[in-house]
Image (spheres, helix red, strand yellow):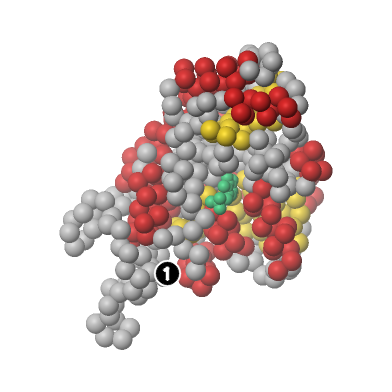
């Protein structure tokens, strides 16, 4: 295995945690579908007993994600370097929430992915007795007030979805650790990706991903991941991954690993395209406002520059008008597909109030600013001229 610390990010996404297959020398990890592994004598095996517990194809992906996030766990300490892959992002979240006890207090950002909020509020508050406090974490005073010595976990997503607010991870760490000694800091790093933002470097304990999005990048596998910063946490997550069992299948791990290897060039292109499209939208008379972390008018532009290497491919904008105009835009685009999800090579448009964030109560949506004229673009890696032309004709069609 090549020493990850010696590699620049563009090489790390290809070689991080990877090694040739020892029996055949295969450069790409084969898809090991075997559910079980032969033992030479009871309890004597080659480190593999049963695929829920260990699978070489899944390990390859898990090791790549762990090195990308900057884990310093060694193979002797954990066979997948502290990376764990799951059947979906929400399965990863569900497993992560098992790190805290029944009745635990969690402080979460108020602008979470709709499904994450649904799991917290509509499932775990009931079944795990969690006390979840939502707070606008861009307001660090409000966050400090929400923190108590008994808070067991902080759950952050940045940039937030769909309002593209940036949460200062370093400050969250400082405030959280001052308030609560044993608090676990978890960052859903799906939007930024570890190619752009590394929560461990800023003091976080766990990075979570929906690998369905940028990591896989091709809209053809649903998956999730957790990465632990320390060996004791990796031990706990290894136990929970096996005990709960919502693991990623070997075929999905192979597909996701293939996708992940182009994460670097994709993120660069997503960012280039989104920057140009955001500027175009900003100047268009039928657009009321544009929120993109790569624009100089983003309210937290200095923090963006400090915390993120790349601004990414997500743009949120408000169309001049209401639901009817937003609907017409979404129906009129031709290259952009109207679909949930994000982070893939093809461009998508989403109407959060009706689609991804429908499970967020209307009053909360209003408070967050997710109005009926708000649209979210996941800008793909197509030729930018085509994307601009598509958005332009769709904006003209709403007149
Ligand atoms: C999609 C998404 C999830 C949920 O992941 P699934 O793979 O759909 O289960 C969680 N967080 C964020 C930020 C997401 O975009």
Residue occupying image coordinates x 68% and y 29%: 327
* Residue 189 in picture, x, y percent from top left: 55, 46
Q: Is residue 278 left or right of residue 119?
A: left
Relative to 306, does residue 115 appear above or below in the rendering? below
Q: In terms of secondary structure, where does tag 1 sit?
A: loop
Closer to the camera, 159 or 304?
A: 159
Residue occupying image coordinates x 39% and y 44%: 260
Relative to 351, does residue 113 appear above or below in the rendering? below
Name the image quarter holding the C terminus. top right
Closer to the camera, 170 or 39?
A: 39
The residue at which mark 1 appears reads as: 52
Relative to 194, does residue 99 appear above or below in the rendering? below
* Residue 318 in picture, x, y percent from top left: 70, 26
* Residue 330 in picture, x, y percent from top left: 62, 29
Q: Residues within 10 Å of mark 1 (few under 14, many from 20)?
A: some
Task: Single out the residue that lies furthest toward the right.
Answer: 363
Splitting the image into 4 quarters, where does residue 202 fall? top right
Splitting the image into 4 quarters, where does residue 262 fall? top left
Query: Does the rendering let one see residue 116?
Result: yes
Residue occupying image coordinates x 18% and y 56%: 25
Closer to the camera, 382 or 52?
A: 382
Task: Single out the residue that lies furthest toward the bottom.
Answer: 42
Residue occupying image coordinates x 34% and y 59%: 57
Q: Is residue 339 left or right of residue 255?
A: right
* Residue 110 in picture, x, y percent from top left: 73, 46
Number of residue marks: 1
Q: Is residue 58 left or right of residue 40?
A: right
């Amino acid at each position: 295995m090549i020493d990850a610390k010696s590699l620049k990010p563009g090489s790390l996404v290809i070689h991080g945690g990877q090694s040739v297959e020892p029996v055949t020398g295969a450069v790409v990890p084969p898809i090991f579908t075997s559910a079980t592994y032969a033992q030479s004598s009871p309890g004597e095996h080659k480190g593999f007993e049963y695929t829920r517990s260990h699978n070489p194809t899944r390990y390859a992906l898990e090791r790549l994600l762990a090195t990308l996030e900057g884990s310093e766990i060694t193979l002797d300490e954990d066979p997948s370097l502290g990376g764990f892959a799951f059947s979906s992002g929400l399965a990863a979240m569900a497993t992560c929430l098992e790190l805290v006890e029944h009745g635990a207090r969690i402080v979460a950002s108020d602008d979470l992915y709709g499904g994450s909020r649904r799991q917290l509020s509509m499932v775990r508050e009931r079944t795990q007795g969690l006390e979840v406090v939502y707070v606008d974490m861009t307001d660090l005073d409000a966050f400090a007030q929400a923190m108590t010595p008994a808070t067991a976990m902080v759950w952050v997503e940045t940039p937030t979805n769909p309002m593209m607010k940036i949460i200062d991870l370093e400050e969250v760490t400082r405030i959280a650790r001052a308030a609560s000694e044993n608090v676990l800091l978890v960052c859903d790093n799906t939007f930024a990706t570890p190619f752009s933002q590394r929560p461990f470097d800023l003091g976080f304990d766990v990075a979570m991903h929906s690998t369905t999005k940028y990591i896989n990048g091709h809209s053809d596998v649903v998956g999730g991941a957790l990465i632990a910063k320390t060996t004791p946490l990796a031990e706990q997550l290894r136990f929970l991954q096996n005990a709960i069992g919502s693991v990623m299948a070997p075929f999905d791990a192979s597909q996701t690993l293939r996708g992940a290897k182009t994460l670097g060039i994709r993120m660069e292109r997503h960012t280039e395209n989104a920057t140009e499209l955001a500027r175009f939208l900003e100047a268009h008379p039928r657009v009321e406002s544009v929120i993109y972390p790569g624009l100089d008018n983003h309210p937290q532009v200095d923090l963006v520059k400090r915390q993120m290497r790349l601004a990414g491919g997500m743009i949120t904008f408000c169309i001049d008008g209401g639901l009817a105009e937003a609907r017409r835009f979404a129906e009129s685009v031709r290259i952009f597909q109207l679909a949930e999800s994000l982070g893939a090579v093809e461009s998508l448009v989403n109407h959060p109030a009706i689609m991804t964030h429908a499970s967020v109560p209307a009053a909360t949506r209003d408070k967050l600013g997710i109005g009926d004229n708000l649209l979210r673009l996941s800008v793909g890696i197509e030729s930018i001229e085509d994307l601009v032309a598509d958005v332009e004709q769709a904006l003209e069609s709403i007149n």
